[in-house]
Image: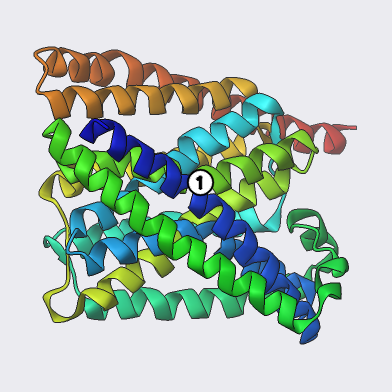
Amino acid sequence: MPPFLQSALQVLAGIGLLFGGGELFVQGSVAISLIFGIPQLVIGLTVVALGTSAPELFVSVSSVLKGSDALAVSNVVGSNIFNVLVVLGSSALVLPLRVESRLVRRDVPLLLAVSAAVWGMASAGRVTWQAGAALLIALVINSVWEIRTAREEPEEMAEAEPQISTETANGGFIKACILLLLGILLLGVGSNQLVAGASNAAKLLKVDETVIGLTIVSAGTGMPELVTSLVAALRGRTDLAIGNVVGSCLLNQLLVLGSCAVVAGGSGLLVDPLIIERDLPVMVLTTLACMPIFWTKGQISRLEGGILVGLYAFYLTDQVLNSTNHTWQDEFRLTMLCIVLPIVLIIIVLQTVMYWRDLNRLRITPSAE
């Protein structure tokens, strides 16, 4: 078998095992939580969210243990970019996403603050174990705060959180433990296969592991979020589709990146200079772009969803041109900077202005009467 085909099969097998392992991990964890009487709201905010981010966690930690820091960091950054541009954009193309949830109004500014903080932490070329511990502490504080505030608004949260079937716990504690352990096993094997296949592919293609992590690996580990959000959108549960993306992006930085930095130990988690200069700013800017999109008419329209998916296509093209040192790279970036980005900004600004103008009219009209 040709070496490249073998690497491609390893990557595909790893993605499949991660997908199956994540599903079994969620089923087993939910069953155990229900058996011990943990409220469904808490399960939805913690266990289910952790399950969809488990592939990123296992792949990134496995990469750090194998000395591939670049793959671990690029997987986190690439997954967040994939989540916002592809998962959110694709879900909006299926059905315009209604933005009314407390989760979105609260978590998007928090996500933006965390993304900016991570960019600052990584700007020195490494994320220290102390910074990683701070991210994990922030995760605990945020989880406690989220659960406390969610209980104050149970009716609104019921619309934004996944429905958890109590039948999951009917198989008993032993079956739940078997599902959980099997899920962890598949996640472990899948992450090793994906990391090995991606590393070999990078060597064969003579491209940096960072590029592979930002594209193939991040898209593969982001598949659970994509499937979850698309299914939620098809069922009309648009708040869940948005909450899944925002929650996953938060977990990727607080849990996954924090864990990787702690596992890296005293040497810290090395960050490729190219990620600091190009991809971390893109991650922050995509998060920032969500703010005016969420404000406009209280929903993410199909047009805005198409713009997000289109921007990811441009981002992917830039990655390919950069990795192959193509002569068109400078012309492509100039086109993006001078034409595409201004058009996107104009559309977002116009929609925001129209939204606030209509909102002011609605406020003035009743008083005039």
Above or below — where is 156 with respect to 79?
Answer: below
Q: How many marks?
A: 1
- Residue lying at the far right in this picture: please name it: 369
Return the residue nearer the eye: 242 or 364: 242
Above or below — where is 265 with respect to 224?
Answer: below
Disc 1 is placed on an element classified as helix
Q: Which residue is painted at 77% across and 75% down in the image?
A: 151
Q: Position of residue 144 (x, y in %)?
A: 59, 80
Q: Which residue is painted at 15% across and 35% down in the image?
A: 204
Return the residue nearer the eye: 169 or 123: 169
Q: Quadrant of the N terminus?
A: top left
The answer to whether residue 256 is left or right of residue 300 is left
Above or below — where is 171 with respect to 338?
Answer: below
The answer to whether residue 146 is left or right of residue 69 is right
Q: Which residue is under mark 1? A: 16
- Residue 81 visible, this orientation: no
Q: Position of residue 233 (x, y in %)?
A: 72, 37
Q: Position of residue 53 (x, y in %)?
A: 50, 59
- Which picture quadrant has residue 81? top left
- Residue lying at the far bottom in this picture: please name it: 36
Q: Which residue is painted at 16% across and 31% down in the image?
A: 205
What's the amino acid at mark 1?
Gly
- Which picture quadrant has residue 202? top left
Q: Which residue is painted at 69% across and 35% down in the image?
A: 97
What crowding class fits label 1: few (fewer than 14 Cα within 10 Å), some (14-19), or many (20 or more)? some
- Which picture quadrant has residue 346? top left
- Residue 338 visible, this orientation: yes
